[in-house]
Image (tube, rainbow, N blue to C red):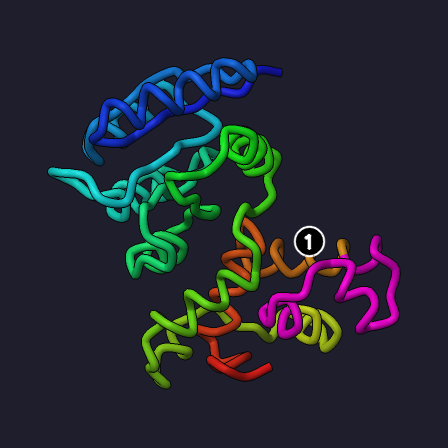
Amino acid sequence: MSLRAVIADDQSLVRTGFRMILAADGIEVVAEAINGVEAVSAVRRTRPDVVLMDIRMPQMDGLEATRQIMAGGDETRVIILTTYDLDHYVYGALTAGASGFLLKDVTPEYLVAAVRLVRSGDALLAPTITRRLIERFAPRDEMKATLHRDLSELTPRELEVLRLLATGLSNAELATRLTLSAATVKTHVARILSKLGLRDRVQAVVLAYETGLISPGGE
């Protein structure tokens, strides 16, 4: 099954370079965009599997474009591109539904691996990096938790898994900490995502902080 991508970046050299890298690995670039308006239009027109989205573009930035794409309800995944590690826009993009982010100086091998990983339904961004973003940029609003979906649907074990997942533990580390098999942990994580209507682990980490299940700097 072929993998289809859209590249949105206002720099032609970046688009050309990424297109060549993806094409060399058999990934079809079905459209390019130079701003967020074009990116949203291209996604609606071509229905790609993955979008490589620059965060800073004219007319409409990558953050707003990501929001609009995610609001469309299709299965397209968005990877945010940035030249700055821990860019404060990235946190907004993650909360808008992006599946992760890449620095623009990413190696060709990692770029291809990232696109394929996100297409498979996994989250690109390691929970530890997500945690750093949240601790630095998440608003400290005690009242905000009441606006989020209820965590009462989760079992005590699932709440425990979510709390530990939000501290940056991998499935293997969760299995060791909880004395469970890797398969059981994977099942717990899948049920958490399903019950809370989340796309991936990145959104689970964001939600854990925003509901107050875990606080910045805490475990």
Vertical side of 40 occupied by 183: above or below:
below
Magenta highlight on residue 216: no
The image quadrant where one finds the C terminus is bottom right
Q: Counting other residues with Cα less than 10 Å from the Cα at mark 1, is it few (<14), some (14-19), or many (20 or more)?
A: some
Measured as percent of width and height from the top left, residue 5 is found at 43, 23
Residue in view at x 34 percent, y 27 percent: 7
47 over 177 or under it: above or below? above
Query: Viewer-proximal residue, 159 or 92?
Result: 92
Q: Mark 1 points at which residue?
A: 190
Q: Does the magenta stretch include residue 171?
A: yes
Rendered position, 181 above or below 51: below
Question: Residue 140, position in %: x, y?
Answer: 34, 81
Residue extent of the magenta highlight? 162-185
Q: In this view, does 109 lie above or below 211?
A: above
Query: For the stretch drawn in magenta, what is the main secondary structure?
Result: helix
Q: Which residue is drawn at 42% across and 65% down?
A: 133
Rendered image quadrant of residue 126:
bottom right
Q: Quadrant of the rendered structure where residue 116 is?
A: top right
> Residue 14 at x, y = what percent?
31, 27
Amino acid at dot 1: Ala
Q: Quadrant of residue 170?
A: bottom right
